Amino acid sequence: MMSLIPTLLPPLKSVRLPTILLLLVPALAACEQSQSQPQASAPPPPQVTIAKPVSKMIADQDEYVGRFVAVESVEVRARVPGYLEAIHFQDGQMVKAGDPLFTIDRRPFQIALAQARASLAQAKATLAFAESDLARAQGLTVGTVITQQTFDQRTQAKRIAEASVAAQQAAERQASLDLEFTELRAPVSGRIGDRRVSIGNLVTGGTSGNTSLLATIESIDPIRFEFTLDEASYLRYGHAVQDAAAAANRGLTLPVMLKLLDESTFSHEGKMDFVDNAIDRSSSTIRARAVFANPDGKLTPGMFARVRMAAAAPKNELLVPDVAIGVEQVRKFVLVVDAENVARPKYVTLGPVVDGLRVITKGLMPDDNVIVNGLMRARPGEKVTPQQSSADSASIARPPIEAN
């Protein structure tokens, strides 16, 4: 400040000394006030919450998307033609094997059965006469009382009558079977769809492909789930199991867990029951199938779902909440606090999410103090104020619930 006085004095030679002193007093006072104020202190280290990784036995698992299919799927079609007379079910209801479903007008088939039975009786009467006529001829001397030709004719008549009786018996059985076919019953247990034909319509029956479709039945419990495995996964599963390769499931006895599209956890447990006999050349995948119990009928054929299969034996893994993981371009990292309370980054390799926590497959140690809350406030290489979590990492991972 004193260096300013010479610069001010030359221009102020003509100014009186009292005036100069009045100008210098405020400047000196401001300088002394600035020197007396203390410098601003540095902000304290940010507070963060730390916790050790959760150690848990985790199995290496793969997930696949597939679709449910019924174990038994039946199209209900008429075997005989006729007019539909009655329907014995409600659309969409559960039916058991043997329950009546449709009734076709029985009267024409009752008449046909009566005619077949009358023809059978006539044939039996003809056979009885032929047998008695032949018996009389056998008691006579051939060549003297009866000629050989007459004897042969009576023998032939008996054989013809026997053949006629056999033919009429077959016709009677066919007429009886046609009459039975007028009552259509459920061949399997399951859920029936809607009726495709109303009462009073003519139903086309028979064994040809143009018969009338009346309804469909899909079995419910148990239910199958079909999905495809890639070739690499199939080989990996084959190395995990060495026995029962000749079984239908190729020895894949690994547990299979399933979840629906609106579920967050794999809560349905099933088992493998089939692996296809060839890998598809166009997609390099092989078709596989699992079976699940479905007592409540919630799982429906045609529904999409996701299955999880264990690819290897369980091993110990470290887990942290997703909020503790940072991103640096393509690399993932977590911040750990060392003995000097300095945040240090550790680059990690991520695995799947298990029970709300992220599996860390590489880059983390069990005794590391991971920042699980306050990651955005901490800076790598700078000090922090750590606070040990009073709960495990799983509870920290859950977001707090705010009251409305």
Image (cartoon, rainbow, N blue to C red):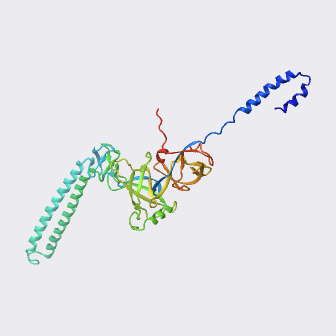
Relative image position of residue 147 (x, y in whole percent): 12, 75
Q: Position of residue 239 (x, y in %)?
A: 46, 66
Quick check: 79 above or below 166?
A: above
Vertical side of 389 occupied by 113: above or below: below
| Residue in the foreground of this view, choosing between 90 and 331 | 331
Q: Is residue 278 left or right of residue 208?
A: right
Location of residue 171 (image quadrant): bottom left
Of 332 and 65, nearer the camera is: 332
**Horizontal side of residue 385 vs 28, given as left or right:** left
Left or right placement of residue 146 versus residue 265 in this view: left
Residue 364 x %, y %: 54, 55
Quadrant the N terminus occupies: top right
Residue at the image position 62 percent from the left and 50 percent from the top: 329
Q: Is residue 285 above or below residue 264?
A: below
Count all numbered tags in the image, as a single digit.
Answer: 0
**Residue farthest to the bottom?**
143
